Image (cartoon, rainbow, N blue to C red):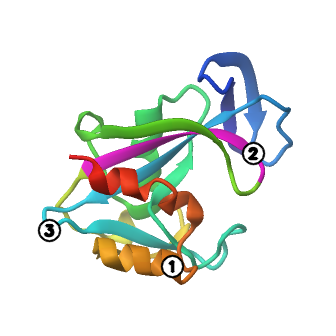
């Protein structure tokens, strides 16, 4: 069971928590992270969701997920990356590219933080701590846009990709 801290749209904690899957009240937001990982060739790590995922099975995405109660955004980004693709990132290496309030495609309001990390290590899903990901691979910017344009990528991952690509 996941428990999240709740916020206003201006990222002020409201002193309430939320259990994932239950209905959120109007004006309540939870914190979500998208983690883009780039190698020295300018490719980005993209994973394919497992067929067992309840939302968007077999679609491609960057690492993403909800920040748990008591976690900071960067702590959530590092944890989600380890869980999903088995990579241990150093928090101090992350760069916050964008933050903003939005409504998620499944109806929950969220504040999304977009993180960018540089990483040149190996990818081994055996190191992942969940089975949320079917496969992961490095992709060029053009291939990522190709997945998006053919409906094979989650919109949650591509909504802010232009900001990641233009970030220096």
Q: Are marks 3 and 2 in contact (CB under 8 Å)?
A: no
For numbered disc 3, what is the local secondary structure? loop
Residue 138: horizontal and vertical position, in percent? 29, 73
Q: Give the mark nearest the N terminus, 3 or 2.
A: 3
Determine the image quadrant of residue 108.
top right
For numbered disc 1, what is the local secondary structure? helix
Determine the image quadrant of residue 154.
bottom right
Measuring 71% from the left and 15% from the top, which residue is drawn there? 15
Nearer the viewer's eye, disc 2 or disc 1? 1
Residue 163: horizontal and vertical position, in percent? 37, 50
The span picked out in magenta is 107-117
Determine the image quadrant of residue 100.
top right
Nearer the viewer's eye, disc 1 or disc 3? 1
Q: Which residue is mark 2?
A: 108
Measuring 33% from the left and 66% from the top, which residue is drawn there? 45
Image height of 13 relative to 59, above or below: above
Tell me: 36 left or right of 122.
right
Q: Give the mark nearest the N terminus, 1 or 3.
A: 3
Measuring 61% from the left and 22% from the top, which residue is drawn there? 10
57 vs 131, nearest the viewer: 57
> Can residue 63 be seen in this snapshot?
yes
Q: Which residue is mark 1?
A: 149
Cα distance between the residues tagged 1 and 3: 23 Å
Q: Which residue is mark 3?
A: 41
User: Which mark, by number, is residue 68?
Assistant: none
Tell me: 4 left or right of 89.
right
Image height of 72 relative to 41, above or below: above
Cα distance between the residues tagged 2 and 1: 25 Å
Most extreme residue toward the left is 40
Q: Around disc 3, counting alpha carbons within 10 Å, would you say few (fewer than 14), some (14 to 19), or many (20 or more)?
A: few
For numbered disc 2, what is the local secondary structure? loop
């Amino acid at each position: 069971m996941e428990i999240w801290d709740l916020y206003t749209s201006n990222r002020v904690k409201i002193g309430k928590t939320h259990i994932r899957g239950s209905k959120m009240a109007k004006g309540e937001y939870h914190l979500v992270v998208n983690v883009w990982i780039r190698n020295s060739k300018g490719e980005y790590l993209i994973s394919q969701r497992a067929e067992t995922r309840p939302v968007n099975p077999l679609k491609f995405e960057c690492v993403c997920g909800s920040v748990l109660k008591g976690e900071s955004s960067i702590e959530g980004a590092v944890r989600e990356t380890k869980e999903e693709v088995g990579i241990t990132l150093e928090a101090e290496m992350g760069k916050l590219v964008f933050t903003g309030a939005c409504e998620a495609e499944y109806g929950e309001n969220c504040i999304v933080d977009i993180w960018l990390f540089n990483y040149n290590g190996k990818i081994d899903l055996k190191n992942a701590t969940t089975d949320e990901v079917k496969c992961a691979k490095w992709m060029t910017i053009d291939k990522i846009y190709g997945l998006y344009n053919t409906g094979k990528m989650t919109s949650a991952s591509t909504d802010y990709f232009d900001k990641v690509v233009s970030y220096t």
